[in-house]
């Protein structure tokens, strides 16, 4: 393993000069600093997190409890969050363990903060006990977690979707996104779906919300097949997320139907790739760039003020594309 001492010997400077240069200290001349950084990169130097924490009392690392390797939206979020934090000089450590195990791992590495996704192990004891006083930020669990949170107004997002479809003349609207396991993030959307249909005096029954095992591609596919088998088929559907949407599109295509001619689709998840699906997708939600910027900023604020409690709600928008059109008479 390459050390600061190795770099110092190669560069012909002192140990302290290398240390200051790697921390971008103004006490080192820019020419010398660039020379040292070039050598460090050439030698493949990686900072020692434990050693750094002994000096600065901070590790420069942030722990992320990885929610799923299969969910496209969450993978996109984590990638963008990592990019944001890297720009601020932080590294991210990912754990796929449950929250209890992940926090124990992060404690050993003395991370400066922990990011948890609100649909992961929300009943874990760690969500209610933090004896280590490591700042914890949850995404998507405002109101369900005692810790700081960044969340999207998911209910408003679904209300925007229902309102858009109603303006296009759709009356028979279904919702796909109700997993068997309790998920507070989906519960908020479902409640908003029911309420908005009631306010707009649109028909609603228990079959309007499709039950499924999970929130993956296959779940969306199977739910859409069941929906399309109904004697009275909905003319529009709201999807709980991009993975479900892809499954819905597959089921619709297999039946020889087209979007939006036979059925209009609005999807939750305002991701860039929504515009690149086989049918550019009308979406509701907050742009992923906005979400990740706020998450990264809030994490850094919590590191500076670990005793503070922050709750940030982001307001969604409706982006209309080719997947929705007026209801056929």
Image: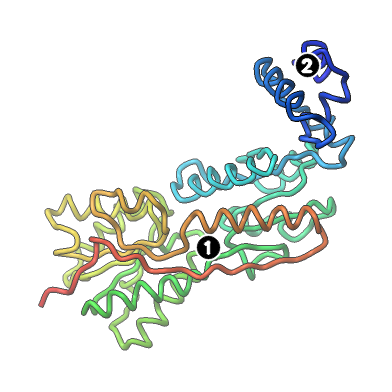
> For the point 84% across and 50% down, which residue is it?
132
Q: Quadrant of the N terminus?
A: top right
**As drawn, 124 above or below 4:** below
Disc 2 and disc 1 in contact, CB within 8 angstroms: no
Q: Quadrant of the C terminus?
A: bottom left
x%, y% of residue 202? Answer: 29, 84
x%, y% of residue 28? Answer: 82, 30
Tell me: 136 left or right of 212. right
Tell me: 120 left or right of 200. right
> For the point 58% across and 55% down, which residue is it?
293
Tell me: 121 left or right of 229. right
Q: Nearer the viewer, residue 182 or 141?
A: 141
Q: How is the image coloured?
A: rainbow
Tell me: 322 left or right of 149. left
**As drawn, 102 above or below 22:** below
Residue on which the image places disc 2: 7
**As drawn, 203 above or below 279:** below
Residue on which the image places disc 1: 182
Please state which of the two labelled residues, at mark 2 or mark 1, is closer to the viewer. 2
**As drawn, 95 above or below 160:** above
> For the point 74% across and 30% down, which residue is it?
30
């Amino acid at each position: 393993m390459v050390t600061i001492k190795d770099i110092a010997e190669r560069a012909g400077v002192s140990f302290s000069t290398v240390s200051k240069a790697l921390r971008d200290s103004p006490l080192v001349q820019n020419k010398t600093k660039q020379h040292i950084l070039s050598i460090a990169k050439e030698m493949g130097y990686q900072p020692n997190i434990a050693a750094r924490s002994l000096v600065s009392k901070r590790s420069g690392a942030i722990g992320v409890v990885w929610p799923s390797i299969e969910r496209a939206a969450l993978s996109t979020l984590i990638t963008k969050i990592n990019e944001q934090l890297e720009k601020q000089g932080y590294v991210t450590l990912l754990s796929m363990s449950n929250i209890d195990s992940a926090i124990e791992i992060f404690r050993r590495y003395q991370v400066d903060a922990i990011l948890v996704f609100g649909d992961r192990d929300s009943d874990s004891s760690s969500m209610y006990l933090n004896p280590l006083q490591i700042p914890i930020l949850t995404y998507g669990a405002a109101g369900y977690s005692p810790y700081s949170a960044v969340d999207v107004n998911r209910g408003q997002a679904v209300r925007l979707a229902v309102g858009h479809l109603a303006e296009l003349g759709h009356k028979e609207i279904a919702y796909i996104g109700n997993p068997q396991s309790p998920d507070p993030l989906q519960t908020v959307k479902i409640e908003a779906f029911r309420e908005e249909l009631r306010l707009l005096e649109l028909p609603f029954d228990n079959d309007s919300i499709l039950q499924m095992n999970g929130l993956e591609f296959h779940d969306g596919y199977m739910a859409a097949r069941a929906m399309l088998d109904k004697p009275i088929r909905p003319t529009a559907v709201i999807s709980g997320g991009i993975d479900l949407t892809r499954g819905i599109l597959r089921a619709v295509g297999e039946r020889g139907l087209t979007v939006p001619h036979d059925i209009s689709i609005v999807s939750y998840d305002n991701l860039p790739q929504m515009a690149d699906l086989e049918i550019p997708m009308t979406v509701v939600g907050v742009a992923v760039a906005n979400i990740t910027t706020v998450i990264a900023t809030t994490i850094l604020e919590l590191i500076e003020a670990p005793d503070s409690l922050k709750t940030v709600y982001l307001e969604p928008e409706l982006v209309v594309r080719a997947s929705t059109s007026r209801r056929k008479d």
